[in-house]
Amino acid sequence: MGPAIVFFLVLASAAPLLLASQVLGDYPTPKPSTVWINNNVFFKDSDSRNIIPRVVVPDSNSEIYTDAGFHCVPSIFQCDQFLFAVSIGNSNTQQMSRSFNQQIAGFADTRQIIWSANRDRPVRENATLEFTTHGNLVLRDADGSQVWSSNSSGQSVAGMVIKDVGNLVLFDHNNRTVWQSFYHPTDTLVLGQSLVEGMRLTSNTSATNTTEGMLYITVLPGGLYAFIESTPPQCYFLNPLRQNKTTNDPTKVTFMSGSLTTYQSGQSDFRTNLVFAPATSTQFMRLEYDGHLRVYGWSVDRWTPVYDVMTSMEKDDCDYPTVCGEYGICTERQCGCPVETNSSSSYFKLVDEHKPNLGCTPITPISCQEIQHHRLLTLPNIDYFDESNTAANATSIDDCKQACLKNCSCMAVSFRYKWNAPHGKCVWVTKVFSLKSIQPYDGYNSSTYIKVQLSPPTENRTTVQPNPSSENKTKVMLGASLGAVMALVLVVIVVALYLKRRRNYVDEEFDFDQFPGIPTRYSFERLSECTEGFSKKLGEGGFGSVFEGKLGENRVAVKRLEGARQGKKEFLAEVETIGSIEHINLVRLIGFCVEKFERLLVYEYMSGGSLDRWIYYRHNNAPLDWSTRCRIILDIAKGLCYLHEDCRRKIAHLDIKPQNILLDDNFNAKVADFGLCKLIDRDQSKVVTMMRGTPGYLAPEWLTSRITEKVDVYSFGVVIMEIISGRKNIDNSQPEENVQLINLLREKAQNNQLIDLIDKHSDDMLSQHEEVVQMMKLAIWCLQHDSIQRPSMAIVIKVLEGAISIQTFDANSITFAQDNPSAYSAPSQASILSGPR
């Protein structure tokens, strides 16, 4: 299964109870007539739901062990779906608590699932695993429905153990194997495990979705093959065998230390799939969701990929069927849609303009009822990964193309040939996955022809000879029409001048109805009533005050802008931008008001107020616990990631600070205040803009006025440090050497004294200082002087969720923008459109 955050919790047993222990081998061997309940009723302080003794892997210097039990599928803060699975891990890490910040430290990489029974149907809390008196292992969900069974009843099963390196075995009274997980592999092979003809490894759907994907590897009499599911399946990798088979014995491929060993008819055919040196640590091999077959080994404190089997066989990234999705063309790892040479017609569009790797889709779907309007799009120097489905009778390009056009199930053909050769190879494609751009070599070339649907041609019309009298009438009508248009233009100009003079000192109203998805427009009178005459003031922001109001049964926050003339541009940006996007971690703009000089914004009400009131202790509030601070940091990251990655145009917020982070009653955080936002086209690497934002949170590149969305990443790093330290970034109440928090961070990091920066109000944080220091290291990564070195917000989220590790940087590489005081000859003003506070 793909890399994921996987927590390992303790398994409660029902009949009889299994008293769990953290000591290896201290679990009783499960026997028939036992039921395990997937909950923490009896084991509240335990972190593992294992049902059989942990088994230390032989010859493992790192105390690698395997176990079986209920394991969480990927989740951030809670476990609500579980797999009955076998995992492999390190015993030195088993006593780590499953806190959020240990995920940041890479805790998820220390335990990996190598087999699961119910990958396509996870169960919930209170699901049961029953070892029946008849020797059957049955998994049922909380509602009692059967999810999986070993189908081993009636075979005198005596018990269950883990043998070898992760083989879950049911055995009889003579200690003979009745059922084993090695015969039912999922996506992983461990050392000593074999794939026999008829077995397959099937990839996950994605890195975070454990269900079966479209890619699989299987053993056929001719060797080891990798396919993508379609009709028929399409082969993207093969490792053929020498045809020396003399019996009907099945071929099998075994994962050995540093090699794949193929056994055929009692003889062994040693392949060169894995050419690295023999393993120095325990390994396993996994078919990934992207089609790669990777070998993982234990290194220091985590599982890391050490070898890519298919890449070693001269396959590059463009050779995999899903690298650019359906119909996508891979060119030096870049994805694009098919375009015919010297043609202005477009037949394909990206599925997602922001994510080209998701592939392309036909603008006009193929219709078998309109087969007469099919044509083939010519793509020279484009190859296709599959060679297994060939048209034997089509040895010329014309024959190959005609064969495809005559059969509606054919979606494309690829014709491979050598220069000056009379014949070539016609490969038939019924479903088009990723294609590959190639350079001809050794006289070899390939062209691909993709079927497209043309619009039906318009009917031919009989040509009519012109009538002289008709021509005269046409000229008269044309002259009259032209005169009418000129008169209309003059009237419009006169009216426009009149209206402009009339509005000499009246601020013009915007016609917001022209913008799609615009929020509700309210009258000033309505908003005055809902706020009881603007009497309940919640706070003040830049250029305006925020008042509590009530629209129907819903509480709202109404911001009444002041100095509206100065804020017209920002106001329009806010209404256009926030009105068209919605995300759980972005404050929702409900409506607005424009009446003469009055400008008001209506936001959803955030009862917790802004983040600064909770971390600066302005109201003598109790300190936030560490888990709450972690959740707030993740919420901010998700809101920014949506702005940077998932909107039609990238949106740089440009004013990230605690005052613009709002909280609800449960301390869920949302990003507010888009008044300073900058829209960035996807094809732009940088944009030029005048300096804006708040001193103390500005990235160094603001000095050049050429910025990217990475300025938000820098500000995010500052906010992380404020949340951790419980103080302002610039605090003049501190001693002179401690006024600037980021300078202090650099000093403490150089001296290995980061613990000194932890909020002294929080005993909870001080007791978990190792985790807090890990979060500071993430902040240091975000505060890199070179914006290219900073992570994207998508990477930040993966770090926070434990999917990847934090990169380590020298403290000298972080910069506080105000190290250069001349950069701020005049203080920047706050945003005119601050969110509700």
Image (tube, grey):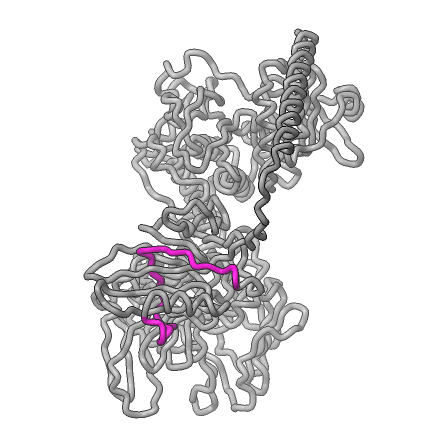
For the residue pair 248 and 426, the one nearer the viewer reads as 426
* Position of residue 573 measured from the top left corner of the image (x, y, whole percent): 57, 26
For the residue pair 812 and 116, the one nearer the viewer reads as 116
* Position of residue 33 measured from the top left corner of the image (x, y, whole percent): 59, 82
Count of number-bearing discs: 0
Task: Identify whether 193 is placed above or below 462.
Answer: below
* Position of residue 492 measured from the top left corner of the image (x, y, whole percent): 67, 16
> Magenta span has 35?
no
Task: Identify whether 167 is placed above or below 721.
Answer: below
Q: Which residue sits at x=42%, y=19%?
A: 735
Q: Which residue sits at x=43%, y=59%?
A: 376
Residue extending farthest to the left is 442
177 left or right of 616? left
342 left or right of 666? left
Residue 215 sits in quarter: bottom left
* Position of residue 447 measured from the top left corner of the image (x, y, whole percent): 33, 59
Residue 234 sits in quarter: bottom left
Q: Is residue 246 visible?
A: yes
For the residue pair 334 and 293, the one nearer the viewer reads as 334
Residue extending farthest to the front is 468
Quarter of the image where the C terminus is located: top right
Q: Which residue sits at x=42%, y=54%?
A: 328
Identify the magenta region. Answer: 372-395
Q: Is residue 188 visible?
A: no
> Magenta span has 381?
yes
